[in-house]
Amino acid sequence: MILYFSGTGNSLYAAKKLAEMTGDTAVPMTAIRGQCRRIQDRIIGFVFPVYFGELPDPVRDFIAQVQFCKSTYFYGIATCGSSPGRALRTMDHILRRQHCTLSYGAVLPMIANSTIASRRHIHYDVNRLDHADEVISEAASKIRGQIEDKAALRSSFSAALMNIGMIRRAGERWLTPSVDADRCMACGLCARICPVSNIICTAKGAVIGSHCSYCLACVHWCPYQAVTVHGKQVLAEDQYHHPDVTAEDMTRR
């Protein structure tokens, strides 16, 4: 089983591609969150983005709450725009609390979706996505052979710094989305696409709740550019999602 968490489609794409290459099944963590307390598959993979140099909180919580078999071969694929931080190392630490271990970790450079918070007229280098399939193919080969490779399970000073209380809170404020009521057409896409069900759609428009995962899915997928980030209007040309992933793919649970 390949369990993935995705906001703008990078990790969804990687999980689906990996499933094709390994003969496995890709399942969104959101589909079984709170419903599955025990997973005993012989091989389990986690595919996830890196936020603040760390595991996204929903991924951390999911792994901590589910019981696994200690003989399982676990692997993690971290999709990121720049550095994987200490995300894979953290995943290994959480698994070790259940007497399990992360046997293999890989870093998959893709396109960062947080650039939208600080820049306009962004030129996304989509060419780097071409290299992603090569990395996935190499990972698939190691997974099929159940190879142990912990080279990517590193610590990170910058990730440790980003997760110091007040610095992390400042980062979260910087990436907090909100709704521009004048632009919102109450289409409901953001509510359907939010991986943590933090948005509801009313007749007057979308309302964002208080347990945001900072994936920015609502910002990038809104067809009316009605979701702002730290109050900043987003340009349609600056919205990003993986080119091979559709909104329907993202809402399919």
Image: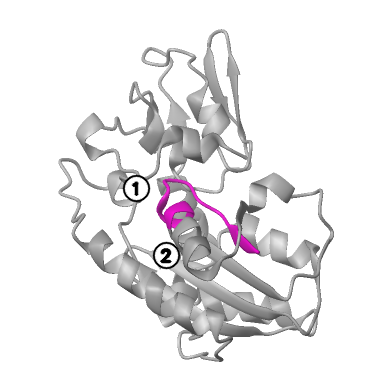
- Residue 222 position in % (x across, y down): 39, 28
The answer to whether residue 89 is visible is yes
In the image, farthest residue toward the top: 203
Q: Is residue 110 above or below residue 208?
A: below
Residue at x 55% of width, y 86% of height: 145
| Disc nearer the start of the sequence (1/2) | 2
Residue 242 disc label: 1
Q: Residues within 10 Å of mark 2 (few under 14, many from 20)?
A: many
Name the residue beneath numbered marker 2. 79
Disc number lying in front (1 or 2): 1
Residue at x 62% of width, y 35% of height: 198
Determine if the magenta segment contains residue 5. yes
Q: Secondary structure at mark 2?
A: strand
In the image, farthest residue toward the front: 23
Q: Is residue 170 above or below residue 236?
A: below
Residue 144 disc label: none
- Which corner quadrant holds the C terminus? top right
Q: Amino acid at mark 2?
A: Thr
- Residue 59 position in % (x across, y down): 62, 60
Q: In terms of depth relative to the viewer, which is nearer, 191 or 247? A: 247
- Which corner quadrant holds the N terminus? bottom right
Q: Is residue 163 above or below residue 241?
A: below
Residue at x 62% of width, y 53% of height: 27
Q: Are marks 1 and 2 in contact (CB under 8 Å)?
A: no
> Which stretch appears magenta?
1-13
In the image: residue 184, left or right of residue 81? right
In the image: residue 140, left or right of residue 63? left
